Image (cartoon, helix red, strand yellow):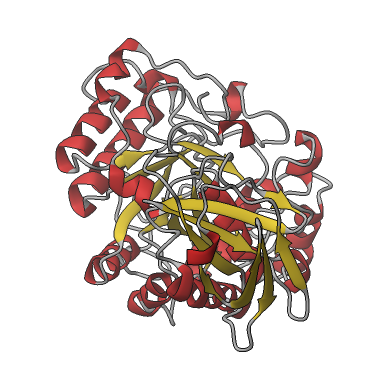
Amino acid sequence: MAMFKSEPVRPEAYKKFERETPEWYQDAKLGIFVHWGPYSVPAWAEPIGPLGTFDEEYWFRHNPYAEWYYNTVRIEGSTAHQHQQEVFDGAPYDAFIDLWKAENFDAGAVMDLVKSTGARYFVPTTKHHDGVALWDAPGTGDRNTVQRGPHRDLVAEFKDAAEARGVRFGVYYSGGLDWHFTDAAVIDGPIEGDRRPVDKEYADYAHDHVVDLIEKYQPEVLWGDIEWPDAGKAPGEKSLVNIFEKFYASRPDGVSNDRWGETHWDFRTSEYEQGRAQEGDGAWENCRGVGFSFGHNTLEDESNSLSGVDAIRNFVDIVSRGGNFLLNIGLTASGEVPELQRHTLEVLGAWNAVHGEPVFGSRPLDSMLGAESDTPWVRWTRTGGIANAFVDLPVGETVVLEALSDRLDLAGAEVVGATSRVDGDTVTLVRADGAVEGLVRVSFPIRGDVEA
């Protein structure tokens, strides 16, 4: 599948969708992802580490993704299976639908936090691999949040709140897996064979869901996951081709990711450490949770989660290399942002309020003008004729930026968050008192008009 594939080939039927990725998405830089479902009730997974750093068999047995709880508890001998027996008496997964009340959920309050980060787009899950829809999706019966659990159209509430705050709205939909509808085999290794549904019945079912999302909520980002059933890839009435036709008719400047199989994409994706080879030319996006899970996980704490400063460094590193950062929060079953995750977003937002202008809408800087460094930690962006250096400068330490290009006007530099001294082709920085938490910035005018 195109997901994490280095050189996917676009089939003939999908070539008509190929175009330059819209400017708004390339300028957006930051999106907020939300995973929320019945898995937020047990809210449990082993926080072993990031995707892409474990072999598949170990990963699935000790899966740190709480949103995969439905699958992990079915792996005999797994810690999650034991947890389900001990804490929930081995109850069926669907019992969590009715225990999920969302009693404290306020879409406006969540979106206020999202907006405060500076994020330009927002993508909530609408149906994850457990098959539970967050709207009254066709064919789901009572297995959705309108009929059971919260008894609310959560997608509509998210959409209205995002629109009211000027944040572009997207939808996540798992087309590649639905453990309930397909009665799928347990996944404890590569997602292939009978572990992924490929038949026409499921392809039609998933098609109707995505079309319903497009028609009801007019998303600007279509974010698929895992794959798409093979029977629905060829052109036809209920095909993925038909879905993209409807999507772009509704949103000509909409964008789609690359997780619909080897079909069509406007931007490539990576996830934690997996798929890093896709972070290169063209539009791309890295996604991850504040912790090692996307769904809320009560076992996560400060030791296995991004601090606010960590989030800032991740964000700036990704942007400096030409990508977007989709940072996930996992709501609690009651509908609140966990305090640890809230704090991380608040620190990121406070920093973006001061430094966001040379980040959002920027482009990577030619390495001949300013090369990234890990000692000291420095990343660069370019905004028009300005080169922006973002420097990790702890309190009480001094950082020297050495041998800067003679095309950078050191004397004309704007320094934010530090005091500076210019000596020849070096700049010495000392963190200023009261500087906002996170990186400091030095913006240098670029001599000449040759674009990097």
Residue lying at the far top of the rendered structure: 12
62 on left or right of 423? right
From the viewer's perspective, is residue 70 above or below residue 255? below
158 on left or right of 51? left
Where is residue 153, by image quadrant? bottom left
What residue do we see at 73% from left, 63% from top? Answer: 400
How far across and down, in percent of the image, does residue 44 sit? 69, 63
254 on left or right of 199? left
Residue lying at the far left of the rendered structure: 249
Where is residue 84, by image quadrant? bottom right
The answer to which of 114 and 214 lies nearer the viewer is 114
The answer to which of 119 and 399 lies nearer the viewer is 399
Where is residue 242, by image quadrant? top left
From the viewer's perspective, is residue 424 above or below residue 219? below
From the viewer's perspective, is residue 401 above or below residue 129? below
What residue do we see at 24% from left, 65% from top? Answer: 163
